[in-house]
Image (cartoon, rainbow, N blue to C red):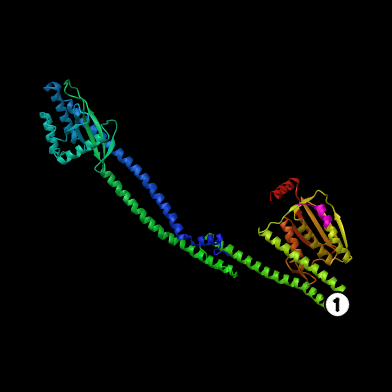
Amino acid sequence: MSLFRPRNKENAIEKKKRRLFKTPIALHFYSAFTAIILFFFISINLGYNRIYNSYIESECSGRIDNAIKSVTTYSEAYRATLDASDFESPTAFRNEYFNLIISSTNVSTDASMALFYEADGSEDNEYVLLWPNPDSYSYEHSEKTSEIMDKIKKKGGYNFSSQSYVNKTSNILKKIIENKGIQTQKVKHILVNDKTYYYKFVKLTYDANDENIKDNYYLLFYIDASNYYSLGDKLNSAMFNTMIITIIIAGVLSIIISFPIISSSRRLSKFANRISKGDFAPYKGIIVSRELNELSETMNQMANKLEESDKEQKTFFQNASHELRTPLMSIQGYAEGMKYDIFDKDEAVDIIISETSRLSNMVENLLTISKMDLSASNSYQVKKTIVDVYELLGVTIDKVRGGFIHENKELINDIKIKSNVHIYANENDIFRMLENVFSNCLRYAKKNVWFNCYTENDKVIFEISDDGPGISDEVMSHLFDRFAKGSDGKHGIGLALVKAIATEHGGKVTAGNKEEGGAIFRIKLPTVTANEQLSHQNKTKEV
C-alpha cells in the first residue's frame, strides 16, 4: 500500500482560489478614481511642460533678438557720425567702433552681452574676452565715446568692473565654445552650473584696410532662464501637491460611494445564503443601486420558483411513492396469498403480472419525464433522429391495438399523410407520448376511440378522441399537471409526460371536449424539410 496519496487537483485549485486576495469594491472605485486622476494630471503636466518650455524658448529668443536689434541700431547710428579719416589708423577706427558697441550694452536690458575674439593662429579655439573684462580691453576711448560711457554709468549702468560678472560671462563663454562651438544661425541653450542659458553669437564685420586686423571678433548675447524654470518648478510642485490631495479626497469619496453597494451586496449575500439553506422567504430590504435592486428582484423571483419547485418535488415524491406503493402492495398481497394458498394461483399470477406491467410502465414514465426535465434545464440532450411519421403510426397502432381488443373497444383510424412526412424526434418518446393519450382515451371511452393524423402549415397533427363523458371544468384546469387527480379519483403523470415530450420536440398539446360528447386531444409537431433532414443527419454524424 502506498504511503502517499495523489493530490486532488480540483481541491488544490479551490484552496488556491480561497487564498487569493479578493479586491474590495471600495478599492475598485479608488483604483478607478486614482487612474483617472493620474491620467488627468500627467496629461496636463506633459502638455503644460511642453507649452511652458516652448514659451521660455520663444521668450528668450525674442529678448535676444531684441537686444541684438537694439545694439545694432544704436551702434550703427553712432558709427554714422564717425569719419574714418579722423582717425590715425584703421586700428584706431576699429577701437572707436568697438567702444560704441560696448557703450550700447545698457541700451537694451533684454540680454547680457560679451565681446571676444579668437586668438590669431589658434588651433584649440582659444579666445580672449574683451568685454566685460577691462583688464584685457585697454583701448583708449575717444572723447565722444567717453562722454557716452560716463552718461551710462551715471544712470546706474552695469558694473562692468565686477569680477563676479566677468567670471560668470567667461565661464558661460568657455562652456559654450567647448560643447557647441560658435554658431550664429539661431538661438540655442546650454546648462552651466545647473542653470540654463539661452544664447546667440553675432560676428562683427567692419571696413578696414589694416592687414593686421582679422574678422574674427564676436558678440555673445545670452539670458539666464533660471527664473523661468524656477517658476515652472514651483507650478509643477503645486500641481503635484494638488494631485496628492485629490487622490486622498478620491479615497474618501470611494468609501462613501461604495458603502451603499457594499452594504447591499452583503445583505444580498446573506439572502443567497438563506436560500441555500432552504429558506425561500423573499427579501424585503431597500436597495439603493438600480442594478443591485434588479438583482434582488431577480433573486426573489428565483427564490419563489425554487420554493414552487421544492413544493412540486416534494409533492412529486409523495405522489410517486403513493402510486408505486399501490401496485407493490397488490403484488406483495397476492404473492403472500399464493404462499399460504389463500388465492387461486392462476388468478393471482395474472394480477401480479398486470400490476408488474403497470408498475413498469409507471417507472418508465417517471424516468422519461425526469429526462425531459433535465433536457429543459440543458443538463441532458435527448437523442433525436429523422423519423418517418407514416412508419411510426403503423408501429404505434399495432402496439396499442391489443389493449383495445382486450377492453372490447374499437380503434378507428383516419390517416391522411403520405410516407414522405418526417419529424426530427426521439422515436421512443413520441411512441410513449401517443401511447399515454391512447391509454387515457381508452380508459374513459364507452365504445370507440378515433385517431386522425394530417399535416397543416408545416406541422403534423395527431388527433385522438373518444366517446366518453368528456373532461370536466375542474379537471381541465390542471389536466396536464403532474399527478393530477382525474374524475375517477386516480392520480397519474401520463398527460404531464405527454406535454413534456411535445414541448421537448418543439410542439404543443391541447385538450378539449367535442360538441357531440367525449374528449379530444391534439398534438402538433413541426415537420422537417429535405435540407433540414440533411443538416440534422450531418450533425448526428459529427456527434
Please tell me in which quadrant of the rendered image residue 174 appears: top left
Label 1 neighbourhood size at 10 Å, few (<14), some (14-19), many (20+)?
some
Label 1 residue SS: loop
The total of numbered circles placed on residues is 1
Front-most of residues 156 and 244: 244
**Location of residue 31 in the rendering, given as x and y in whole percent from the top left corner:** 44, 55
Give the amino acid type for the residue marked by disc 1 in the picture. Phe
Residue 480 in picture, x, y percent from top left = 74, 64
Is 408 magenta? The answer is: no
Residue displayed at 42% across by 52% down: 35
Which residue position is annotated with label 1?
343
Asked if 178 appears above or below 430 in the picture, the reply is above
Residue 76, image x, y percentages:
20, 27
Is residue 479 among the parts visible in the rendering? no
Question: Relative to 132, does residue 526 appear above or below in the rendering?
Answer: below
Instruction: Magenta stretch: give its range.
Output: 386-395
137 or 509, which is in the foreground?
Answer: 137
The residue located at (39%, 58%) in the rendering is 249
Image point (30%, 46%), residue name: 232
Whether residue 133 can be seen here = yes
Identify the residue at image location x=82%, y=58%. Answer: 396
Q: Quadrant of residue 310?
A: bottom right
Quadrant where the N terminus lies?
bottom right
Magenta residue check for 389: yes
Assign the magenta stretch its main secondary structure: helix
341 relative to 305 in the view: left or right:
right
Q: Position of residue 132 (x, y in %)?
A: 16, 35
